[in-house]
Amino acid sequence: MTDLANGPQSPERKLLIVTGSGRSGTSTVAGALKKLGLYIPQPEVEPGPTNPRGFFEPRWAVDFDKRLLAQIGVHNIDGRPQALQMTTEEGAKPEVKKELSDWLSDHLESDQILVKDPHAFWFSDLWTGAARSLGVTPSFLTMLRHPAEVVGSRDMHYLAKRSDEERKMRETANIAGWVNAALITEQASRPHRRAFVRYTDLITDWRTAMLTAREHLDLEYEGDLTPGVHHEIDDFIDVSLHRARITWDDLATPGYLRDLAESVWQELSTLVEKPDDEAAIKRMDEFRETYDAMYTSSTGLVYHHIVAEVEKARRQGRRQGRRQMAKEQQEQHAANRARRLATKVTGKVKSLRGRGSAE
């Protein structure tokens, strides 16, 4: 880039944060972006049984965000509206901000830096603030996958050995978490360049999906994306990746929550082509109010159940405490008896030695 008045200018350095619900294709799109020339800070998370092709996540970044969530008791798929305030307050701590800025400053060797982490949306202010403090422009790419498929895919990988009752309960909780996360991510990304990519679009026609994302995010890609010209991404993405073809009929989700999740999905799909569609954004704000009211009423519905479970846990804790105290007292009594016996034996030995010397 050249400025006629001031001479050559350095290209704008960008941080692209790839996020989205787990099992929504974040690893697939991050892998594609890496093959298109974006830089992922090393080392990366190693491939595993749930993702044998690779996660394409910076190991440090994932551990950092997961640690912060664990410290305040927030789950990645967390349906509590107030969870966002908790993560925002944690991310605003000076020592936390410094830790992230120090790490990011050591990984600026590329003009296009890619950080994929499904936990990052909880700390959007933290990440964007750290980027800006280093002169880096943040942007977001959010992967979209139908909530029924996301939850069905999670069940396939994480709940295969659970009872039917627990699976139904977790399905409802995970749909609520999907809605909450979708609303948070959409709102957090509004002030920045952003792109939304549907998982089905990515695996059926990755060129079109990635070219649309490039336009929205103002990225530079490496390689020839002309249809018919082979690219290594052609060997990386294939339709067989779309294994969990699940609909609402396959899940035991309350109708009112299913309808809200479907509405959120439809508006997010609108943002794929036009990320700043004002009508869609307005409806997302309305969905935020609807969800918060729904959550409050649902909490009231199960209030006595929650109180009973808390009291049950307290009673169990007290019983365990008493058992532990009794065990420690028994061990102490045994130790005292052993010491007294040892003292008595030692005394007898000394007495016998004394008699032997006298004789």
Image (cartoon, helix red, strand yellow):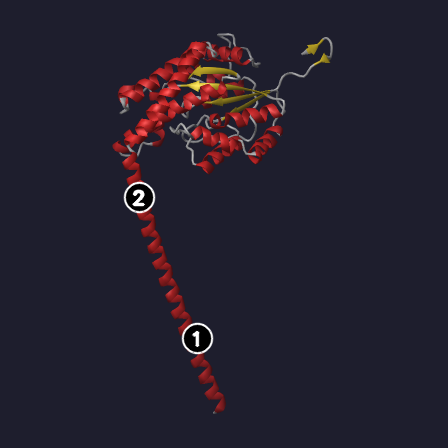
Q: Of marks 2 and 1, which one's residue comes earlier in the chain?
A: 2
Q: Which mark is residue 212?
A: none
Residue depicted at 26% across the width and 32% down the height: 165
Residue 39 in percent (x, y) is at 57, 23
Residue at image x 28%, y 40%? 308
Q: Position of residue 202 (x, y in %)?
A: 44, 15
Report if residue 173 is visible in the image. Answer: yes
Residue 236 in view, yes or no: no
* Distance from the alpha carbon under mark 2 to that under mark 1: 47 Å
> Which residue in the protein does label 2 denote?
311
Callouts 2 and 1 close, C-beta under 8 Å: no
Query: Circle 1 sits in a helix, a strand or a loop, which is it?
Result: helix
Q: Residues within 10 Å of mark 1 (few under 14, many from 20)?
A: few
Q: Please state which amino acid type lies under the numbered disc 1.
A: Thr
The quadrant of the picture occupied by the N terminus is top right
Residue 127 or 346: which is nearer the viewer? 127
Dot 2 amino acid type? Glu
Q: Position of residue 141 (x, y in %)?
A: 49, 18
- Quadrant in the rendering for residue 283: top left
Judging by the rendered image, the residue that carries numbered circle 1 is: 343
Q: Position of residue 32 (x, y in %)?
A: 50, 19
Foreground of the two, 353 or 100:
100
Which numbered disc, 2 or 1, marks the residue closer to the eye?
A: 2
Rendered residue at 30%/37% (across/down): 306
- Which residue is at the front of the view, 62 or 300? 300
In-front residue for pair 60/67: 67
Element type at mark 2:
helix
12 is higher (above) or lower (below) than 160: above
Mark 2 neighbour density, 10 Å: few (under 14) some (14–19) many (20 or more): few
